[in-house]
């Protein structure tokens, strides 16, 4: 047994990739299942706040784009569930755990999308933060997860740009439209910063995940990268990041900024965010309402298989 | 409704291979669940080729794939390891010889 784990560690140390049927420590497998499942759940729950605006998108062009984006989120969920299944779990079980509240999804999706500008803010900030988190995951030590992330990252770039375009259009419109964009930034800024997780000092899984090559950068490092990337973009839009302490350090080329209220993050994770119950209830209902489709498809497949057997005999 | 009735039947797993353009081989891109081959193909199109990533798709029931075992990879691939003379770089070419 020692030999097998030696080969795992040697692969990790050489920055190699672990593939599904390789021997791996139980903790590595569990950590990956937890993380990939949570990631997959986030993709499909993330369809809800945006789906909310498909019927009210301000033009046919915007509606077509938003539908394509929401379809992408479903696709990302599927890539990730497929990656999780290579670790020996069933997607159906993961969905059960989500529906029972035993596995989490990203807290950001527990905030409501109140105006059309929120759709812009989600693409620009939420998908922007997701990209910062996800690009390093393309080099994750677990092969199937890394490969899924390559596909996801290629597609996220469209998501971020379409969001920025929505806000750019609003910011160059009427004063009321610009005000709407500013309001969206005010509400989404802090939850977006929370997307990188707790500060390094109190992050429970970070150290081991870094040692295993699952995680490549610390939460605080990625948060800083996001701020440095995003603040100049807000300047282009002509709206203000709602942080009075935000300053640019000429020497380091980095911004110093106020940390988000992590007490709020923990509350939302615990289930006390503005939309936790609504999101989960909607997800469970959609799953139950779709049961007849799955049953009909299975019955049809069974009937066809029997016919084939009959004609072969 | 009993717990058993509520739970959807487990759909078989299919491995998906996509030919990105003519002249190239099909390459494994991932997997998905579907009740039958026709649905597997349609789902594969929707999941893996939303941006013209392919001109042809294969779906194969995952249970029909026989794979070599990672545990015995050293012994299994051993026969190739000590036959360096199979590579052209093994041979010394005298100075001045061209087109060899």
Image (cartoon, rainbow, N blue to C red):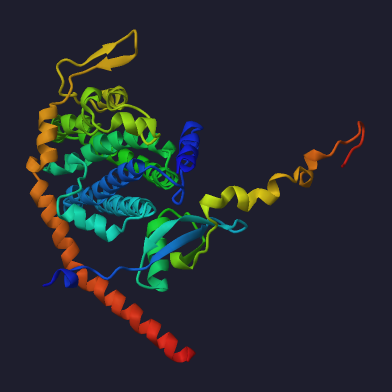
Residue B83 at what x, y percent from top left? 75, 46
Q: Is residue A174 shown above or below A224?
A: below
Q: Is residue B75 left or right of residue A188?
A: right
**Residue B77 placement, left or right of A25:** right
How many numbered dots are placed on residues in this image? 0
- Whether residue B49 is visible here, answered yes or no, is no
Query: Which residue appears at 51% of the width and 32% of the height?
Result: A14
Using the image as rendered, state which of residue A257 and residue A12 is in the foreground: A12
Image point 38% across, 61% down: which residue? B32
Quarter of the C terminus of chain B within the rendering? top right
Residue furthest top in the image? A251
Residue drawn at x 29%, y 43% as measured from the top left: A35
Query: From the viewer's perspective, is B5 left or right of A71?
Result: left
Residue placed most toward the observer, A178 or B60: B60
Q: How far from the left and from the top, in percent, is residue A53?
A: 17, 50
Q: Nearer the viewer, residue B48 or A114?
A: B48
Q: Residue at x 43, y 53 (%)?
A: B51
Residue B20 sits above or below residue A110 on the image? below
Q: Quadrant of residue A128?
A: top left
Quadrant of the image occupied by residue B38: bottom left
Which image quarter: residue A156?
top left
């Amino acid at each position: 047994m020692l030999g097998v784990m030696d080969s795992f560690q040697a692969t990790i140390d050489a920055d190699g990739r672990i593939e599904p049927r390789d021997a791996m420590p139980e903790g590595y497998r569990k950590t990956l299942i937890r993380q990939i499942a949570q990631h997959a759940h986030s993709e499909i729950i993330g369809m809800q706040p945006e789906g909310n605006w498909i019927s009210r998108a301000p033009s046919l062009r915007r509606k077509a784009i938003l539908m394509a984006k929401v379809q992408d989120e479903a696709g990302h969920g599927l890539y990730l569930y497929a990656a999780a299944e290579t670790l020996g779990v069933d997607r159906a079980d993961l969905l059960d755990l989500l529906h029972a509240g035993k596995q989490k999804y990203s807290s950001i999706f527990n905030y409501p999308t109140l105006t059309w500008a929120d759709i812009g803010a989600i693409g620009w900030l939420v998908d922007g933060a997701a990209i910062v988190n996800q690009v390093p995951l393309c080099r994750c030590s677990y092969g199937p997860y890394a490969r899924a992330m390559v596909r996801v990252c290629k597609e996220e770039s469209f998501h971020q740009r379409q969001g920025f375009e929505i806000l750019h259009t609003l910011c160059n419109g009427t004063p009321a439209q610009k005000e709407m964009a500013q309001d969206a930034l005010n509400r989404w800024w802090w939850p977006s910063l929370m997307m990188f997780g707790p500060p390094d000092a109190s992050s429970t899984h970070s150290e081991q995940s870094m040692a295993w090559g699952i995680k490549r950068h610390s939460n605080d490092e990625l948060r800083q990268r996001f701020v440095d990337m995003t603040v100049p973009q807000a300047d282009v839009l002509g709206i203000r990041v709602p942080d009075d302490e935000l300053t640019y350090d000429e020497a380091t080329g980095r911004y110093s900024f106020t940390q988000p209220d992590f007490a709020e993050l923990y509350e939302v994770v615990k289930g006390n965010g503005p939309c936790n119950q609504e999101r989960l209830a909607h997800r469970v209902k959609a799953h139950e309402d779709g049961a007849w489709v799955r049953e009909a498809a299975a019955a049809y497949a069974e009937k066809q298989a029997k016919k084939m057997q009959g004609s072969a005999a | 409704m009993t717990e058993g009735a509520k739970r959807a039947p487990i759909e078989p797993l299919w491995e998906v291979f996509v030919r990105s353009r003519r002249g190239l081989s099909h390459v494994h891109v991932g997997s998905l669940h579907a009740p039958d081959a026709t649905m597997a193909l349609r789902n594969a199109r929707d999941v893996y080729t939303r941006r013209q990533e392919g001109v042809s798709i294969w779906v194969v029931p995952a249970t029909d794939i026989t794979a070599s075992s990672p545990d015995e990879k050293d012994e299994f691939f051993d026969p190739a390891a000590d036959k360096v003379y199979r590579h052209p770089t093994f041979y010394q070419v005298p100075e001045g010889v061209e087109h060899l």
